[in-house]
Image: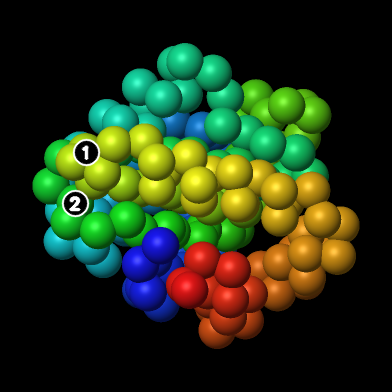
Amino acid sequence: MSNEVLLKDCVLVDLNVSPAEKNAALKEISNQLGNALSVPATQIEEGLLKREEEGTTGFTDGFAIPHTQVPDLKDVRIGVVTFENSIAWESLDGQDIEIAIVLLTPQAEGNQEHLKLLSLLSRKLMNEDFVKEIKENKHNQDALFDLIAEIVNK
């Protein structure tokens, strides 16, 4: 995995989404990450929405892992997003989402890097201590960056 999968500009804290539902959240995430990564937000949004049609990316315990391939993206990137208000998302456990960890990969990458990161993040979100630490720091950009970067920026 590349050195800089997570950039500090891609850690978005207390994102205000109205209405507090999945499609509005994905649109706002796409706008913010598109701007931070200098790629068209529409490419991100279309990919994320298409992926949600295949099945929810809402995980458990208030987390979602939306993911897609982005045509104009040069390197694998992760975004970490916390929401001002929880988001109705159709998660696996029925809970609203407080935190989204967004995985974006270039189309040229194929699925290997994408699947490795998705697996890594999914396993970490099954760790109660990790989930607790993320939730305790969900309003702190620096702490969130450090927690996730420790896992993915290797």
The residue lying at 65 percent from left, 25 percent from top is 90
Residue 89 at x, y = what percent? 61, 31
Instruction: Please tell me which residue lies in front, 112 or 63.
Output: 112
Residue 67 at x, y = what percent? 43, 39
CA gap between label 1 and label 2 equals: 8 Å
The residue lying at 78 percent from left, 59 percent from top is 131
The number of discs equals 2
Q: Which label sits on residue 47?
A: none
| Colour setup of the view | rainbow
The residue lying at 78 percent from left, 70 percent from top is 133
Q: Report the residue marked by disc 2.
A: 73
The residue type indicated by label 2 comes to: Leu
Q: Is residue 111 left or right of residue 60?
A: left
The relative height of residue 98 versus residue 59 in the rendered view (above or below) is below
Name the residue furthest right: 128
Q: Which label sits on residue 107?
A: 1
Q: Secondary structure at mark 2?
A: loop
Q: Quadrant of the N terminus?
A: bottom left
**Image quarter of residue 5:** bottom left
The relative height of residue 96 versus residue 150 in the rendered view (above or below) is above
Q: Is residue 129 left or right of residue 115?
A: right
Q: Secondary structure at mark 1?
A: helix
Q: Are marks 1 and 2 in contact (CB under 8 Å)?
A: yes
